[in-house]
Image (cartoon, rainbow, N blue to C red):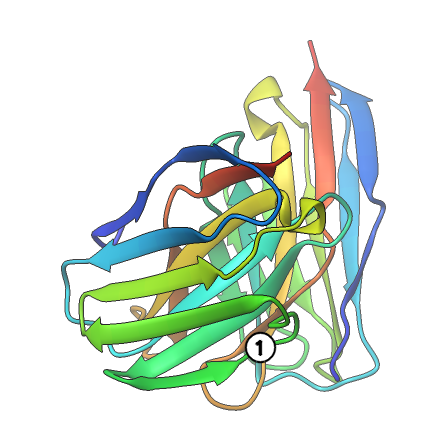
Amino acid sequence: DAGITQSPRHKVTETGTPVTLRCHQTENHRYMYWYRQDPGHGLRLIHYSYGVKDTDKGEVSDGYSVSRSKTEDFLLTLESATSSQTSVYFCAISASGPSGLNIQYFGAGTRLSVL
Amino acid sequence: TQLLEQSPQFLSIQEGENLTVYCNSSSVFSSLQWYRQEPGEGPVLLVTVVTGGEVKKLKRLTFQFGDARKDSSLHITAAQTGDTGLYLCAGAGAGNMLTFGGGTRLMVKP
């Protein structure tokens, strides 16, 4: 599992409240990613990080912000949660596989419901 | 924007049948990865194909990368109930970025 821990695993919140999801890795990987998964859409990239304090937007970044103050932690924040942000959120890291190609390893996900 | 279309979206078959899942794009990818995801878990990498025309086998699963590196297929022979899950293809682009297809949800009935 490449030492990736997501917390919380489940969260129910109300519209308009801030929410922060945490991704913790233990293997010092440089690249970290946040995706959301919705039926029929596969995985869509929200934000990614290529180092401490180095982050960039992905395909569906509106309404989300991220921070990476330490190599091991990548935080995803919903400033004011909306019902459209109800989803399953996955964190991933990128590491070199056996053939030298970059492979992404995923956490177990956080199921977020915004009521 | 690179897009990957996966088909079919859903597939329900009997144990022992064969099936093929397709992953198509108009873009060229440096490599293509196939993941399998079970309920409540994150995707897990099955295979990476890199060279146009490449074929890789993983027991009863056969993966092929198109000659032009724009499409790929996953063929399962004699499906088993343990093959049930969500199959995702992902194309590798610039940097360490992946573009995911929409997924194929496979159910294999006993």
Q: Residue at x 32, y 53 (%)?
A: A22
* Looking at the image, residue B53 lies above or below residue A86: below
Q: Position of residue A25 (x, y in %)?
A: 21, 59
Q: How many marks?
A: 1
**Which of the 4 image quarters holds residue B36?**
top right
Q: Is residue B11 left or right of residue A15?
A: right
Above or below: residue A58 compared with residue B56: below
Amino acid tagged 1: Gly
**Figure check: A74 above or below B1:** above
Which residue lies at the image location 15% right of the left edge and 64% below the top edge? A27
Depth check: B57 or A38 in front? Answer: A38
- Subunit of mark 1? A
Secondary structure state at the residue bearing disc 1: loop
Place of residue B76 in the rendered image (x, y in percent of width and height, measured from the top left): 67, 40
Query: What percent of the width, then of the height, locates residue B60?
Result: 58, 39
Report the front residue among B94 and B11: B94
Q: Is residue B41 left or right of residue B15?
A: left
- Of B107 and A80, which appears nearest the observer? A80
Label 1: few (<14), some or many (≥20) within 10 Å?
A: some
What residue do we see at 34% from left, 84% from top?
Answer: A50
Quarter of the figure with the C terminus of chain B:
top right
Q: Which residue is mark 1?
A: A58
Image coordinates for residue A11, horizontal then vertical, percent: 45, 34
